[in-house]
Image (tube, grey):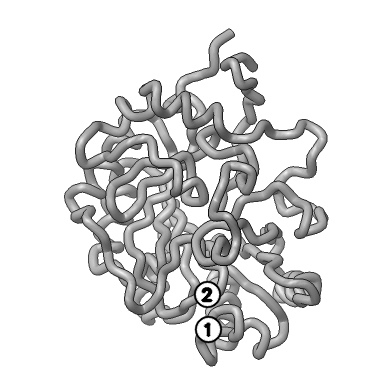
Amino acid sequence: MSAPSARTTLHAIELEITGGCQLSCTHCLSESSPQGTHGQMTAGDWQDVIADAAALGIPQIQLIGGEPTLYPYWVDLLDYALARNLRVEVFSNLFHVRPAWWTIFEQDGVSLATSYYSDDPVEHDRITQRHGSFQRTRTNIMEAHRRGIPLRVGILHIHDGQRVEQARAEIEAMGITDIQMDRVRAVGRAAKGSDGPSAAELCGRCGINRAAVLPNGDLTLCVLSRFMPVGNVRATPLADLMDSPEWQDTRKKIPLISPSACQPDGSDCNPAKTPACLPKFPLAPIYLTTQDGHR
């Protein structure tokens, strides 16, 4: 049996709407920073992708960056998606939240996601390369939870001795239960000093549950597989790219998912060994596809 079309299995698409960020995290997959740009995609281009996703039956988009709230039209894109009955997750560092944004986040169909690295402010700020980021992110995590906004927190294991388990305990103590853990992947800044990114760094789910569009319009199987683009949405419609031989050929380069491996669902997996790939979404059914296209 041939592998199912991407348009029938994807249940979310990551839209990396900017490379700008207030932080310069040591491991950033997109190498975003305060010097990052919004890329070549216009607001109209992003709306076309959202409309195409809705037409394909993909039920959710994720606004990601960089820091997506630095993109000047992020609210317009969020509203555009909601108007097409798509769910929207905003993956924010929660370093800065304007008071008016809380009402936006409280809308039905909107959720938040963020990253948290340690219960130690010094260690957290050392990773983000921004003094005070721990306190500001922590405060806004608590405010989002207080307001009842759906929120998931990703904890990334970056270096030996990092207080990831203590960070998880702290988030749980706040009453937040959607916590997912992962190891750092050698993509972006985290690949510096190595032979560069490779498919071996990926968890195997790329192109199965999700896909991603980067600031230059490149379509990839996820934001982490950014070094393996399959085409560009500014030149080719999303549906055509997902049905293309380039998509299928790239998918075959991704390592298979081990059926016995622990799943990236927020379980108690060792974060240094879990096959999770943050950022991610609640998971749809997984097809285990062999190199010859069978499942």
Decide which of 193, 93 is in the foreground and name it.
Answer: 193
How many neighbours does mark 1 have within 10 angstroms: few (below 14), some (14-19), or many (20 or more)?
Answer: some
Q: Percent from the top left, x then y, of residue 161?
A: 80, 76
Where residue 60 sits, quadrant-wise, is: top left
Residue plotted at (35% across, 51% down): 214
Q: Amino acid at mark 2?
A: Cys
Relative vertical location of residue 228 with respect to residue 27 in this rendering, above or below: above
Decide which of 82, 279 is in the foreground and name it.
Answer: 279
4 vs 154, left or right, is left
Decide which of 56, 262 is in the foreground and name it.
Answer: 262
Q: Is residue 157 visible?
A: yes
Q: Earlier in the sequence, mark 2 or mark 1?
A: 2
Q: Split into 4 quadrants, where in the image is the N terminus?
A: top right
What label does residue 14 carry, if any? Answer: none
Q: Marks 2 and 1, Cα distance to the nearest angstrom?
A: 6 Å
- Which residue is denoted by mark 1 in the rendering? 129
- Which residue is denoted by mark 2 in the rendering? 25
Q: Amino acid at mark 1?
A: Gln
Where residue 121 sits, quadrant-wise, is: bottom right
Query: Which element is circle 2 on?
Result: loop
49 vs 96, left or right, is left
Relative vertical location of residue 166 with respect to residue 88 in this rendering, above or below: below
Query: Which element is circle 1 on?
Result: loop
Q: Percent from the top left, x then y, of residue 200?
A: 64, 43
Q: Are marks 2 and 1 in contact (CB under 8 Å)?
A: yes
Residue plotted at (66% across, 74% down): 117
